[in-house]
Image (cartoon, rainbow, N blue to C red):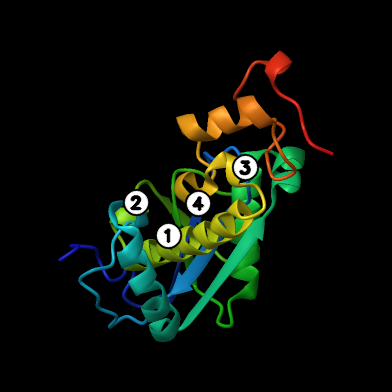
């Protein structure tokens, strides 16, 4: 059993919010918001980082089917460069909340910072994806949708090994940038190589 709590407030409708991809060199940051029923149970569900890829893929359709409402939103690398990754993460969560078909009473946000969403109170919970099912569910959706995106653009630029590293700063990814330059999906404000070694494709 994961040991996660089913809810924080018994009488409030809670939406768990989380994001994936903040520490990546390329691609979007992706966020999800999920409202689970109070009686939701799943012994497998946990923080997405603690789950195998196979388990995340197994959980995604269960979350989507059994949730009261769910939504996923992307903020791409251009917007990240314009407003910085922290604000882009908040924006992605706001966009996901915008799309929820039911309005929650409170937002349970993974982490220690958040830009308040209009008319819905929020509570930041450090390592919340390992404490509450709704945040864990959001972490699984954000992670799986982002992974799918990175695997798709891997076909366009296989030199970066995104199928395996999903855009994170692995040795293979950095070597791909060193040998081939960065591409249109790379975040230009993230300097992972010396300036004289970094260039961009048109």
Residue 117 in sight in this render? no
Question: In the image, which disc is placed on residue 163?
Answer: 4
Tell which circle, 2 or 3, labels the residue nearer the N-terminal end: 3
Tell which circle, 4 or 1, labels the residue nearer the N-terminal end: 1
The CA span between labels 2 and 1 is: 8 Å
65 or 195: nearer the viewer: 195
Residue 26 in sight in this render? yes
Label 2 crowd bin: few (<14), some (14–19), many (20+), radius 10 Å: some
Q: Residue at x 59, y 60 (%)?
A: 152
The CA span between labels 2 and 4 is: 17 Å
The CA span between labels 3 and 1 is: 19 Å
Label 3 crowd bin: few (<14), some (14–19), many (20+), radius 10 Å: many
The CA span between labels 4 and 1 is: 19 Å
Tell which circle, 2 or 1, labels the residue nearer the N-terminal end: 2
- Does residue 180 sit above or below 19 in this rendering? above
Q: Quadrant of residue 179?
A: top right
Q: Quadrant of the C terminus?
A: top right
Label 3–label 1 contact, CB within 8 A: no
Instruction: From the image, tell me which residue sits under label 1.
Output: 139
Label 2–label 1 contact, CB within 8 A: yes
Instruction: From the image, tell me which residue sits under label 2.
Output: 49
Question: In the image, which disc is placed on residue 26?
Answer: 3
Q: Quadrant of the N terminus?
A: bottom left
Label 4 crowd bin: few (<14), some (14–19), many (20+), radius 10 Å: some
- Would you say 53 lies left or right of 101 here? left
């Amino acid at each position: 059993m994961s040991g996660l709590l089913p809810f924080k407030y018994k009488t409030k409708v809670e939406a768990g919010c989380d994001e994936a991809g903040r520490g990546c060199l390329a691609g979007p940051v992706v966020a999800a918001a999920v409202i689970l029923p109070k009686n939701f149970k799943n012994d497998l569900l946990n923080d997405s980082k603690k789950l195998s890829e196979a388990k995340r893929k197994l959980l995604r359709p269960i979350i989507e089917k059994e949730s009261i409402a769910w939504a996923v939103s992307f903020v791409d690398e251009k917007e990240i460069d314009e407003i910085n990754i922290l604000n882009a993460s908040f924006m992605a969560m706001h966009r996901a909340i915008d799309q929820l078909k039911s309005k929650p009473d409170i937002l349970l946000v993974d982490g220690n910072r958040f830009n308040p969403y209009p008319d819905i109170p929020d509570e930041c919970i450090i390592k919340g994806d390992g404490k509450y099912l709704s945040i864990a569910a959001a972490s699984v959706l954000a992670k799986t949708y982002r992974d799918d995106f990175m695997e798709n653009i891997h076909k366009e630029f296989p030199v970066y090994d995104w199928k395996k590293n999903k855009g994170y700063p692995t040795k293979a990814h950095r070597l791909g940038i060193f040998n081939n330059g960065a591409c249109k999906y790379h975040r230009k404000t993230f300097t992972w190589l010396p300036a004289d070694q970094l260039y961009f494709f048109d």
